[in-house]
Amino acid sequence: MFSHIMLGADDVAASKKFYDAILETLGHKPGVMDDKGRCFYYEKTGVFSLSKPIDGSPASCGNGSTIGFSASNADVIDAWHAAGLDNGGTAIEDPPGVREGGAIKMYLAYLRDPSGNKVCALHMMK
């Protein structure tokens, strides 16, 4: 459905450190910097990227926005959360754990990245 996601980051290097750490726990390679100071994570299904805002204003999180990353199991999510905290992220909402809504049962965790963007790791349970 999506070709790419780009998040604003005031300090792309600090954000790269954070995302390299959390995405490694999900099996992804480190981001690649380009000559404009942007960072890209290339996958067959799309691209995740970080950039200073091109209008020169400070980066800001989207109120009500969340970027969710798929995880294979709860242990991976716990490692994702710990890696984020160790690399400049901030814990938000409830601790990692099971959430239920209707017929859906999920294991998930939330963090704010160094620029304040809200990210989540989620595993759909059976």
Image (cartoon, helix red, strand yellow):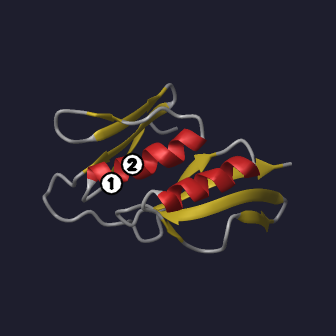
Judged left or right of residue 122, residue 111 is left
Which residue is at a point 73% across and 50% down the rendered structure image?
75
Residue under numbered circle 2: 17
Question: Left or right of 96: which side holds 93?
Answer: left
The furthest residue to the bottom: 93
Whether residue 19 sits left or right of residue 6 in the image: it is right
Q: Name the spot of residue 3 as percent of width and height, x first.
A: 43, 35
Which secondary structure, mark 1?
helix
Q: Are marks 2 and 1 in contact (CB under 8 Å)?
A: yes
Q: Which residue is mark 1?
A: 14
Report the amino acid beneath label 2. Lys
Residue that lies at the very extreme toward the front in this rendered image: 86
Local crowd size for mark 1, using a 10 Å CA cut-off: few (<14), some (14–19), many (≥20): some
- Callout 1 amino acid: Ala
Measuring 39% from the left and 48% from the top, which residue is drawn there?
17
Q: Residues within 10 Å of mark 2 (few under 14, many from 20)?
A: some
26 relative to 95, above or below: above
Cα distance in 3D space between marks 2 and 1: 5 Å
